[in-house]
Image (cartoon, grey):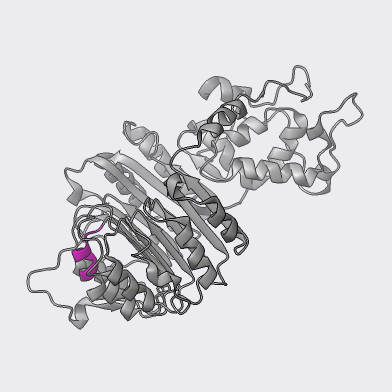
Amino acid sequence: EPYSTAGLSDSSPAPAPGPQLLSITANSSAPNPSPISLLPLELLQEVFRIACIGRTTSPLTPFHLSQVNPYFRSVALELKPIWTRIDDILPIPLANLYLVRSGDAPLDIRVGAWHLRSSSREFIHTWSDILAQYCGRIQSLEVETSEIAMLREWASSLDEHTCKFARLRKFEYILHKGSRKGEDTVMCPVWIAFPDLWDVWIQGCWINGWVSKTDPFPPTLKRLKITDISELRIEKLVEALQAIPGLVTLILDDIQELPASAGLLPESSYMVTLENLKELELSRISETEMVTLVAHVQTPTLSSLSASFARHPNTGGSKFLPDFTKAHPTISSLEVAYSTIPGALWSSILEQLPYLTNLHVFACQLTDEDLEALTLWHILPQLTRLNLDNELQLSTSFVEQVVRTHPDLVSVSLRGWDPSNISSQSLESIKQRVRHIYVETLRNAPEDVGQSEADSESDHSCSDSESDGEWLSGDEAVVRGNC
């Protein structure tokens, strides 16, 4: 095979799957065995899974675990899923070792975060060959770079293999801010190569011709996220959405313009109804663009709306939110950030949402008077979760009134509050009426500072792990040559 691990084989091969591994036990008869050697095998396996799976951990973790001692190595080699995260931070021989050790488990591959910025064409073709060879096993794929030329080179190389990613569920195609010159020549993989795709995130490189009637998004798509785009013409977005009627979540973030062609009206040819869309998230988009969007994209069964006006705080949502909530009275979750909506409009918005169970407000400069409607029992009668974050003018005495008039409230979160607006008496009353309460102030009280410093001086120098003496794992060739 073109990517065999000849010369890099294990000197201590993994035991055959099944009962053989279960018969391996730690040396608990040794004097003063370490606590970890007494763990049941199933618990140690779960620890390994937690340590290795996910983007927040180092891709080298499985390799490190396999170097500790023979027992850890046997456990690590038996757990195929912990070897499935392939990152281009790994040298090619080590990546090939992961591919072999992962068996036939679905792969999570990330290419470009480290090397596509400056790598040679040979390196890009090598990774493209790996993706082509294992395309049938890839379940999650992220292609990320800050150089358009490298992204184009990768897409062109991949297209030469005419791959079909039959098991791919999640695809992230990310171009970081930088040199955007020549953006119209960025290539996009042909969407027909992803027949069962569920989740797509496109950042920084949307091209109006990417998705067309001849090459539409896969109809299986459930979640679409588009971020950091300078211009996205509304008719092209509508055309793309028309191919995915089963879409459940739509996220548009940092779209600078959503222009329509001159004289374009919301005619049927430039409108789409997403019957299955439940979640809509609009962030860092002007209010005018939000109004334009919802005039062309109908969402009759929407249940969750998140709107952030961070880039355009002066518009504040006064034109968008009242009309949108009136048209969607069945919304059960509402998140609003950086809005300057006046109190009278807040009352109107809340009155139109009788089924709302979750309300999250962030940095909207609200006062107790602005949300006075919340103290009325018939406003949001089904409210169970209330998050009021970075609201420096609200008081806990007001929140106490809200809690008293909403007996179904389960959770209250007050993050980023001014300590002077927090009353211990009110908090105690709230605690007696809700199951969960979280309070976080902008600064610690003086008496807390000394305690936090003392807590940070904990001693982590002790170690009770056993030593196996001099022990070779069999991966020394990989370490010496590449790591």
Secondary structure mostly taken by the magenta-highlighted segment of the chain? helix
| Residue 34, quarter of the rendered image | top right
Name the residue rendered at 7%, 74% in the picture.
263
Q: Is residue 17 left or right of residue 165?
A: right
Tell me if residue 111 comes above or below residue 257 in the rendering: above
Q: Is residue 205 left or right of residue 377?
A: left
Tell me if residue 200 comes above or below residue 52 in the rendering: below
| Residue 113, quarter of the rendered image | top left
Tell me if residue 74 comes above or below residue 335 in the rendering: above
Name the residue rendered at 66%, 33% in the picture.
65
Q: Is residue 390 left or right of residue 76?
A: left
Instruction: Residue 462: give x, y in percent of width and height.
Output: 72, 21
Instruction: Residue 145: give x, y in percent of width and height.
Output: 33, 40
Q: Is residue 147 left or right of residue 451?
A: left
Nearest the eye: 465 or 74: 465
Residue 308 visible, this orientation: yes
Instruction: Residue 253: give x, y in percent of width and height.
Output: 31, 56
Residue 213 visible, this orientation: no
Name the residue rendered at 52%, 36% in the picture.
95
Give the magenta part as a residue range.
Answer: 285-291
The tally of labels here is 0
Nearest the eye: 236 or 444: 444
